[in-house]
Image (tube, rainbow, N blue to C red):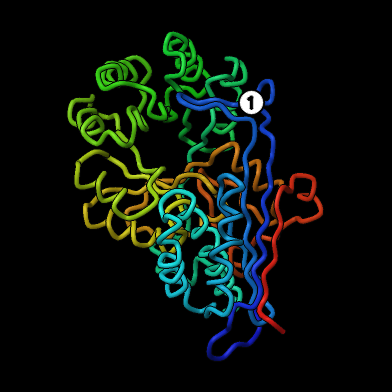
Amino acid sequence: MTRGAAVTGDAAIDRIEVLAYRIPTDGPGGRESDGTLEWDATTCVVVLASAAGQTGLGYTYGDVAVAHLIDSTLAGIALGADAFAPPVLWRAMSAGLRNAGRPGVGSMAMAAVDIAVWDLRARLLGRPLLATLPAFHDHVPVYGSGGFTNYPLDRLASQLAGWVDQGIPRVKMKISRHPEEDPARLAAARKAIGDESALMTDSNGACGRKQALDWARRLRAEYGVCWLEEPVSSDDIEGLRLLRDRGPGGLDIAAGEYGFVLPDFAGLLAGGAVDCLQADVTRCGGITGLLRVAGLAAGYQIDLSAHCAPAVSAHAFCAVQHLRHLEYFHDHVRAESILFDGVLTPAGGALWPDRSAPGLGLTLRAADAARYQVHGGTHALPS
């Protein structure tokens, strides 16, 4: 294993670099869609944090505004902070965002910096990030995710079957944008993956309560679907609880990917709204924020599923006691393979963090990524 620099005492963060990359989608006509949104690109905001001759890498997915917020507020807070104490910096960033707003863009900006500092800490210690966390697992099961609503049937079937052929035993598709088209899409998906593979669905909050309840019953009875994500808006706690209580057995109701601050997750859990909670490490305040959410889920004895960002989630979610699985999302898998060296490939239906590399094991492919760059900023302590 490559060892980091020998460090004693505090290691002050002396440089923060903030970069943003906008990567066009590869969907039909350059677009992709789900139940409530259509998009033509994925923007990844990357943070590089340096101390004692080492550099850590963190990132989030969101508007370029995230990068501007890091530049204007969080970089100044991070400079001079102790790289060995990410939670201390996390608390300072949280306080610093009081007037700007912590949920949403604020929490995503915190996440990118926090992940970079955790990665930096592991690199300074010369250890893989997994080994520096309170890990319960050494791998994270995955499910293939894509199946966008604008995919023609042949591409939908090919994508889902491709994941099964890779040994991933569970796949997810988007539904509810054009409900009249979903029976044919679901039938094509089930035929493509066979009867033994798990079929999961995501409405992205597109349905009303009664419509969602009707679909929940059909999904389970006609297509053997085992997972219905955001059948109604995540803001509708009572609606999610209705689906959980009155939906068919064997169909789990899931939500939480748009949770930013701890009360977002507490509301879903206290409201009895989900069979499985979701969290996105790049939205909920990074690894420090995720550890708080994981403790909350454990208190309710509810499983936690990782939303996307596989390159960092594969390490971070090993520290989740009640782990279900990780969303191996097409757009993020593609973006991370373009931007980084060291990304992981599923083996046996799971991602296994690389124990031979320090930190996340990622390196920014700056030259290859340059064509997609839409923002860049650098901050440093005075020399």
Q: Nearer the viewer, residue 311 or 179?
A: 179
Q: Nearer the viewer, residue 208 or 226?
A: 208
Residue 216 placement (x, y as % from top left): 30, 21
**Would residue 45 be visible to someone looking at this image?**
yes
Residue 148 placement (x, y as % from top left): 54, 25
The residue shown at (58%, 82%) is: 12
The residue shown at (24%, 46%) is: 269
**212 in relation to 382, above or below:** above
Residue 356 placement (x, y as % from top left): 62, 68
Quarter of the image that includes the C terminus: bottom right
How many numbered markers are drawn? Answer: 1
* Mark 1 surroundings within 10 Å by alpha-carbon count, few (fewer than 14), some (14 through 19), many (20 or more): some
**Would residue 2 be visible to someone looking at this image?**
no
**134 in relation to 295, above or below:** below
Q: Nearer the viewer, residue 127 or 383?
A: 383
- Could you tell me the amino acid type at mark 1? Arg
Look at mark 1 in the image and give the residue it sits on: 31
The residue lying furthest to the front in this view is 99
Residue 76, image quadrant: bottom right
Residue 352 placement (x, y as % from top left): 54, 55
The residue lying furthest to the bottom in this view is 8
The residue shown at (75%, 45%) is: 372
Q: Could you tell whether 208 is left or right of 41 in the image?
A: left
**29 in relation to 41, above or below:** above
**227 in relation to 67, above or below:** above
Q: Secondary structure at mark 1?
A: loop
Residue 155, image quadrant: top right
Q: Could you tell whether 300 is left or right of 125 in the image?
A: left
Q: Could you tell whether 341 is left or right of 290 in the image?
A: right
The residue shown at (32%, 45%) is: 277
Quarter of the image that includes the N terminus: bottom right
